[in-house]
Image (tube, rainbow, N blue to C red):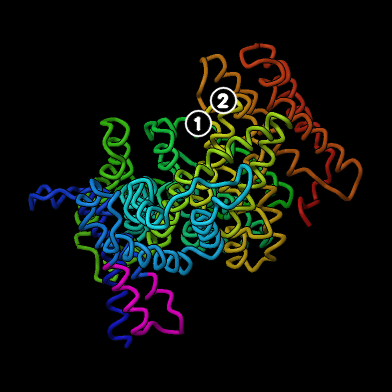
Amino acid sequence: MERITDPLSKLYLGLIPTVGVLWVLDIPQTYFGFAVVGEEAVSTILGIACAAAFLKYPYLKKAGLFEVALGIIAIAVWMWSAVHYEEWIVGMADRTPDKWVPGVIALFLMMEAMRKASGVPITILVWILIVYAFFGHHLPGVFEAEHHTPTKIILYNYADSNGVPGLVLRVVASIVLAFIILGKLMEVSGATLFFTDLAMGWMGHRQGGPAKVAVVASSAFGMVSGSTVGNIMSTGIVTIPLMKRTGFKPKYAAAIEAVASNGGQIAPPVMGATAFLIAEFLEVAYIDVVIAAAIPAALYYLVLFLQVDAIAGRFGLKGIPKEELPTVLNVFIQGWIFLVPIGVLLYFLFWLGFNPALSALYGVGALLVLFIIKKRRMLSKDEWSNFIFGSGENMLPLVMIGGGAGVVIGVLNSTGLGFQLALVLADVGSAAGLLVMLILTAIIAIVLGMGMPTAAVYILLSIVLAPALAKMGVVPMAAHLFLFYFGLLSMLTPPVAVASYVAAGLAGSNMWVTGLVGMQLAAAAYLLPFLWIYNPALLFIGSGQEITLAILSAGVGAWMLARAISDFDGRSILGSLYPATLLAGALAVGSATVWIGTESLWVLAPATAGVAFLLVTKFMGRPANKAASGVS
């Protein structure tokens, strides 16, 4: 049976990116004279992804005829919708069995495939909403749903552009897919090693060099990969052993890699999949999201870098001898081709204003051509296999999440639940205040994110919580980035800190301790979202003076925050008092634009005082015990 299922599984995985690329490049219209509507393309891709999920995650040890049959049925019922989409769209009110019966089968198989490929938590949540769509009209009060017939609910989710083949799945199957393909080609062709070696040559010889290499390399490659775990497994297998070799404790080596890799999704100019969803939901250009995310991302890595430097200084950890490191010039000469596709992407995306998916595919084409010229060969058979099937494998859970998100959006819109929840949450915010509302929102985001991918968490929260925050006067971009950040932080927050636990496995570190150190290193990410809610100038929203003051105060606050955390020593009163004072100062200086005024030059006073305090304590010697560790 393996002789059938293995090639079939590869076929399905290969078809996911192939069909997506054909659609993005509009090949059917250009070369064969027939147009493919977006809903038709994504329904086809979803059916193939369902089939791939059944074979990749079989019920027993190996896939058999049962999984093959389920896959063929899934493709058939989703293709049925795709083939008849244009016909049905004008006659959706005529809900005959030839429409809703395949719809029942398609939705059920999609949910089961999503459970296999994307996990149980999000599947349970979507099932709850499906049950609510059918029976919610029996509930009392604000939870009473608008009543619809079962056939209408099925067809609305199966074949309507507001259901499964809607916005989220279209974004996933085009824009996200193109960036996944670009990231996979970069990985297969050797970009991971290039970025690591480049960072090694630049930072490796400095104090705590390997840890700084992890920060630089993981942030650089994370921009393209868009996957925290994938980033850790790519760069972490090099940086974690190097950090341990030069004296970093396993808990620090793992946590530094986890936090650096997780930040790749928030680092412009190429952010993770969620950034494209933010642009679509807000109906703004992608460059607007990139610009808004620039300062917070810089502060995130500033705090991480300063803490890494402080840890290295505290333990007297040196870098790697220069003679053992590659030179930056040689690395650049050998691997400059990996910078060109990023340049091509940015040129088409930002300068010419092309569609993000097309821009990413042009980057793919550029890299393929340059690889052939530079290496004087094509990709090998194994490299092609890894590239094509690996792209499909990376896309599989995202496609299933896109389908599930379509159900969530469809149910919330058709039942009125989304509107009702937004009203309830807005009332809670009005009664308890914006700060309480933000804290509750952050907790919800982190809890929901435990076990769910970042994109899935963001989709759910943006539908329910973003409107509630907007009703309280929060700038929409600030609200959506707030949700994005805290959904992402679930990857670092115990008890289900996936990023920290994966890195801990590579480092041989205790998972819980690694998670706690990761939270310490990512402290800025837990605080910055609250700051930009109250002062959107941190997102480049405001006057030039407001933005300048916001950057200055937040930058000094970030510096003080890094020192406060890295100098903490709970074994002595002085070792606790000094960092506590720094922490209070960091919060006061960082939020100065909020309590003094966003355009008041008096903001410079606490910022100047903060810098003076840092410099004086640096030259006089820190009161904290230099031999202490931040987390025991």
Magenta residue check for 64? yes
Query: Residue 241's spot in the image, x, y percent?
Result: 57, 64
Q: Which residue of the protein is positioned furthest toward the bottom in this rendering?
A: 1
What residue span does the magenta drawing correspond to?
53-76
Q: Residue at x 57, y 46 (%)?
A: 144
| Residue denoted by label 1 | 477
Q: For the image shown, how many numbered marks are present on the structure?
A: 2
| Labelled disc at residue 536 | 2
Which label lies toward us, 1 or 2? 1
Is residue 147 rendered to the left or right of residue 224? right
Where 78 sits versus 92, above or below? Answer: below
Query: Residue 610's spot in the image, x, y percent?
Result: 73, 25
Measure the alpha-carbon separation of dots 1 and 2.
9 Å
Where 395 sits versus 567, above or below? Answer: below
Q: Is residue 297 something that shows in the picture?
A: no
Specify which label sits upstream in the sequence, 1 or 2.
1
Q: Amino acid at mark 2?
A: Pro
> Mark 2: few, some, or many residues within 10 Å (few <14, many ≥20)?
many
Is residue 557 rendered to the left or right of residue 160? right
Q: Residue at x 57, y 55 (%)?
A: 257
User: Are the residues tagged 1 and 2 within 8 Å (C-beta)?
Assistant: yes
Q: Residue 278: name its quadrant.
A: top left
